[in-house]
Image (tube, rainbow, N blue to C red):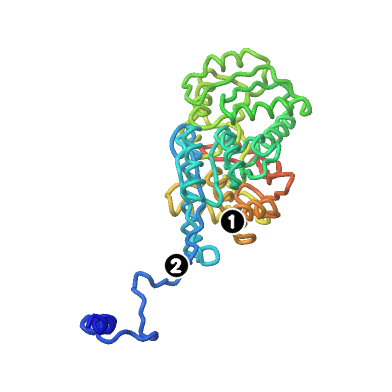
Amino acid sequence: MREGMSRAGPLLLTLGVLALMVALGGCPPTEEEVTVPPEEIVQPGEVEPGAEGAIKIGGIFDVSGPASSLGEPERNTAQMLQEQINAEGGIDGREIEIIIRDTEGDESVALNAVKELIDKEEVVAIVGPSRSGTTMGLIKTVENAGVPLVSCAAARAITDPVKEWVFNTPQSDEDAVTVIYDYLGEQGITKIATITASTGFGEEGLKQIEKLAPDAGLEIVAKEQFADKDTDMTAQLTKIKGTEAEALICWGIGPAPSLIAKQAAQLQMEMPLIMSHGVANRRFIEDAGDAAEGIIHPCGKLLVADKLPDDDPQKELLLEYAKQYEEKFGKSADTFGGHAWDAVMLVVNAIKEKGADRASIREGIESTEGFVGISGVFNYGPDHHYGLSPDAFVMVKIQDGDWALIE
């Protein structure tokens, strides 16, 4: 009896399932009748992630803190690119996901964020951070982990000497000093003073200022420093005013350079004030107000894109990026968002060319040649992980609240 019941069990179970299916809506569907739920249908322009899922890229920017004028447009640009790339089908049918973390202007926060992105999120590459000192503090971690890092910071020391897994996109401080010195030579200036930030960016900038001065025929007659959060630099400026300096070079980012511009104007310092490329955004002009008038600095071509000749290889891209950014965020695009555009697109192009694993991405970036970006035309190689040249810079003068190209 037990054997008969045992044999009948599977039959009864099968009949029960069929009865339930009939009760719920009729006969079991044939292969041709199987339908996909509406929410799972891939619409035109959407991406079907595929079995491997989205390609994860880390983004670490100074969205808050002293360098937020850099980190905010970088974050915005990364998010905009993610939307655009995924709307166009992703990379070989796979979405990209840019996982963004705010460094808060704190190097320890940045380090913890990078470790989380590498170990927990398993990102294939990282773009950012915004600042040079923060980048230098991450190099050992990404090198040990074998994760490509494309920094949005400019210090020459980031890629000199070459680190296997580290690249950067901004025009370097060395190239910035070179074009500044070319300008000073044309003006017949031979004696300069410096006031530089006590940060990685400021310290590396000062190194280049000192290194390149002798060959440029320049004498540095005074050197002063300031901290990112300082609000009164009149003591340093007063010392400089009492020297033989014919021009003052300020090297910093964030609010401090705009305060220096205001305080130099209050002290009626007659020497020209030359800023670094670290102030190449609209916020500097807004913060400095009338004191910004007449200030000279190097910058990428984005700020004067409409003034470039039509045959410039970057012009079309620069105008398109500026238009897209303003339409999406209601504010002008700037150089720093451009650094993030370059970093993200270098990673994306490397994935398209070589594959989505970390080693292939590193190889793809390193073999990049003639890539037209926002910051310039990039050429990398095994012995140079900084892809630009002084030609990526132009010199500008702030006039009537805008940038005028210095020919």
Q: Kindly indicate the quadrant of the structure image that contains residue 210.
A: top right
Which quarter of the image is occupied by the N terminus?
bottom left
Does 72 sit above or below residue 107? Answer: below
At a point 47% along the width and 40% down the height, the residue shown is: 113
In percent of width and height, residue 81 lies at: 50, 55
Mark 1 surroundings: few (<14), some (14-19) or many (≥20) residues within 10 A: some
Q: Would you say the residues marked 1 and 2 are in contact, meaning their CB atoms lie under 8 Å apart? A: no
In percent of width and height, residue 222 lies at: 65, 17
Distance between the Cα atoms at labels 1 and 2? 23 Å
Of circles 1 and 2, which is in front? 1
Disc on the earlier residue, 1 or 2: 2
Mark 2 surroundings: few (<14), some (14-19) or many (≥20) residues within 10 A: some
- Write down the residue under mark 2: 46
At a point 35% along the width and 69% down the height, the residue shown is: 39
Does 350 sit above or below residue 200? Answer: below
Mark 1: which secondary structure? loop
Say whether residue 21 is visible.
Answer: no
In the image, 377 versus 20, the foreground residue is 20
Does 173 sit above or below residue 317? Answer: above
At a point 65% along the width and 26% down the height, the residue shown is: 206
Disc 2 residue type? Glu
Does 121 sit above or below residue 227? Answer: below
Say whether residue 296 is visible.
Answer: yes
Disc 1 residue type? Asp
- In the rendering, which numbered label is found on residue 53? none
In percent of width and height, residue 361 lies at: 62, 54
- Relative side of 291 to 184, left or right: left
Q: Kindly indicate the quadrant of the structure image that contains residue 360.
A: bottom right
- In the rendering, which numbered label is found on residue 357? 1
